[in-house]
Image (cartoon, rainbow, N blue to C red):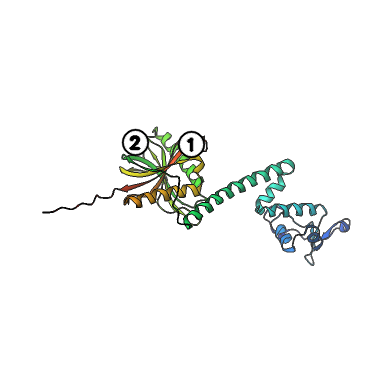
Amino acid sequence: MPFGQDVQDAPLVPDPPAVRGELIAIGELAARTRLSLKALRLYGSRGLLPPAVVDPRTGARRYGPEQVERARRIGLLRATGMPLARIAAVLDAGGAESVRALHAYWREQEAEHAVRRDAVGYAREVLAGAGPAGYAVAEREVPEQKVLFTSRHVTAADLPGFLAEASRSLFARLREAGAGLSGPLFAVHHGLVSEDSDGLVEVCAPTPDAVEPSGRIGVRIEPPHREAYTAVTKGQGDYPSMAAAHDAVGAWLTAHGHARGASNREVYYPNWATAEPGDHVADVAVPFRPRQASGCCSS
């Protein structure tokens, strides 16, 4: 049965007399596998564990003895938190490929857990009233520059994929126009990007050359500005660490009485893909208007 086809769509085949004694009822399958009837029906409806036969009169489901082991494996994989669609791919791979597929899934889960662990650590610091630590903030002048840009509303989960897609699109447009880069790519965060918030992110490629807009790619002038920034290493490239870097720059602006001049941005250097964990690969920056020095005058 194709994956995703409901068992109700399966042909209602009577229990063949030649194999009737070899088939087991759904209750017996549940007893042997310690899976609930609800779970077994769900696996059947998703095409993971379709009954060998379905009685056309009563709708009773009967299973072959070989399905006991498949049901047990489905239950084991579900215990890891694996989605049903992923389980189908793992089981269908077979043999050593199934093992490799399971290892790949678990590496993904461990990476996600590491990100959540860092998020919990930073949240704990914030709740305790501590500011982001370990981020030195400096200032710099940024000249006017022409940029190609493309934008989209994205969540934190969508952001890495969008950055990669946008970078490819911008580089392709530069090649088409015979244009070059005049600086590193940067992404302007016009709204909050989180697990629940889809903020507008604009990826920009600076260029000194003449390039016309094309499709979703626009061209604009980024005005000159002064910005506060902090360096980020490859090991700090995960979402919680980047959030802490944004907070560190924001806290610095507040402490010095400066006003934000434009949206936060992340500047990405060319060594991002090949860098070691301790290598500088990006900056988190915020344009600002310097605080006006207070003074008094007398007549």
Crowding at label 2, few (<14), some or many (≥20) Cα neighbours within 10 Å?
A: few
Looking at the rendered structure, the kind of residue marked 2 is Ala
Tell me which residue sits at (81%, 52%) in the image. 66
Tell me which residue sits at (83%, 59%) in the image. 24
Name the residue nearer the viewer: 237 or 89. Answer: 237
User: Is tag 2's residue or tag 1's residue first in the polypeptide sequence?
Assistant: 2
The residue under label 1 is 279
- Left or right of 237? Residue 50 is right
Q: How many marks?
A: 2
Name the residue nearer the viewer: 200 or 225. Answer: 225
Q: Is residue 222 above or below residue 175?
A: below
For the residues labelled 2 and 1, the Cα–Cα distance comes to 33 Å
Q: Position of residue 174 (x, y in %)?
A: 41, 36
Query: Foreground mark, 2 or 1?
Result: 1
Disc 2 element? loop
Residue 79: tell me if it is visible. yes
Q: Position of residue 163 (x, y in %)?
A: 47, 44
Q: Is residue 85 above or below residue 282?
A: below
The residue under label 2 is 210
- Left or right of 276? Residue 47 is right
Name the residue nearer the viewer: 133 or 143. Answer: 133
Name the residue nearer the viewer: 298 or 280. Answer: 298
Q: Position of residue 53 (x, y in %)?
A: 80, 58
Q: Residue furthest bottom?
A: 58
Q: Position of residue 91 (x, y in %)?
A: 72, 48
Residue 13: tell me if it is visible. no
Looking at the rendered structure, the kind of residue marked 1 is Asp
